[in-house]
Image (tube, rainbow, N blue to C red):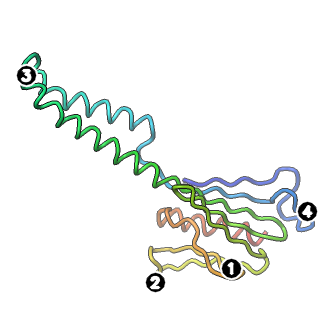
């Protein structure tokens, strides 16, 4: 799953009298990548190879120079579209739980950052099975507003995250 828990190892997370210098729990969430960077290189290489095969028939003639811009534009367009997709998907959410506060920081594309914090005693985790923008919409309510968490996760991943977050907040 595209998230990982980091639990403080120096003491048990159930101890509420722990110092608040280091968090008891930290959760990192990120969107799933169906095409890793290595796959991107392989895909672009194969696309260049396959688009250059028809050009072998006109190799050495002036027609090659008339046809060459079209495959170059096609490869360049695919490259730019995939690169844009990678940049737009650079979302990381970090949920940090201390004994006295809970923070959620969302690092979005293009350097956008949104922060939220509340007292963990008053935070409620809500799973909206229907009625939200997506099925199994997961939100944290506490403090001045309600925030979503893991909107980029699949339905099953949000369900699994709901159970894990519920256990972490109750501890």
Residues tagged 2 and 4 counted as in contact (Cβ below 8 A): no
Q: Residue 83: percent from the left, percent from the top?
A: 40, 45
Label for residue 124? 1
Of the two numbered discs 3 and 4 on the same chain, state the one appearing first in sequence: 4
Q: Nearer the viewer, mark 3 or mark 4?
A: 3
The residue at 87%/62% (across/down) is 20
**Label 4 sits on residue:** 18
CA separation, marks 3 and 4?
Answer: 76 Å
Residue 106: name its quadrant: bottom right
- Density class for disc 1 (Cα within 10 Å; few <14, some 14-19, many ≥20) is some
CA separation, marks 3 and 2?
Answer: 61 Å
CA separation, marks 1 and 3?
Answer: 70 Å
Q: Nearer the viewer, mark 1 or mark 3?
A: 3
**Label 2 sits on residue:** 131
Instruction: Pick the quarter of the image with the C terminus.
Output: bottom right
Of the two numbered discs 1 and 3 on the same chain, state the one appearing first in sequence: 3
Label for residue 62? 3
Of the two numbered discs 3 and 2 on the same chain, state the one appearing first in sequence: 3
- Density class for disc 2 (Cα within 10 Å; few <14, some 14-19, many ≥20) is few
- In this view of the protein, which residue sits in the foreground, 7 or 97? 97
CA separation, marks 4 and 1?
Answer: 22 Å
Q: Is residue 142 left or right of residue 108?
A: right
CA separation, marks 2 and 1?
Answer: 18 Å
- In this view of the protein, which residue sits in the foreground, 60 or 140? 60
Against 35, residue 110 (above or below) is below
Q: Residue furthest top?
A: 60
């Amino acid at each position: 799953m595209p998230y990982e828990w980091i639990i403080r190892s120096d003491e048990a997370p159930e101890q509420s009298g722990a110092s608040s210098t280091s968090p008891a729990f930290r959760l990192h969430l990120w969107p799933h990548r169906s095409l890793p960077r290595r796959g991107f290189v392989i895909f672009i290489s194969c696309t260049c190879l396959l688009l250059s095969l028809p050009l072998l028939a006109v190799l050495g003639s002036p027609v090659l120079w008339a046809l060459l811009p079209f495959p170059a534009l096609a490869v360049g367009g695919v490259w730019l579209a995939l690169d844009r997709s990678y940049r737009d998907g650079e979302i990381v959410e970090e949920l940090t739980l201390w004994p006295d506060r809970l923070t959620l920081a969302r690092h979005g594309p293009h350097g956008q950052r949104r922060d939220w914090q509340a007292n963990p005693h008053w935070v409620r985790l809500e799973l909206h099975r229907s009625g939200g923008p997506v099925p199994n919409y997961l939100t944290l309510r506490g403090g001045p507003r309600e925030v979503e968490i893991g909107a980029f996760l699949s339905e099953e991943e949000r369900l699994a995250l709901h159970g894990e977050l519920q256990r972490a907040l109750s501890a």
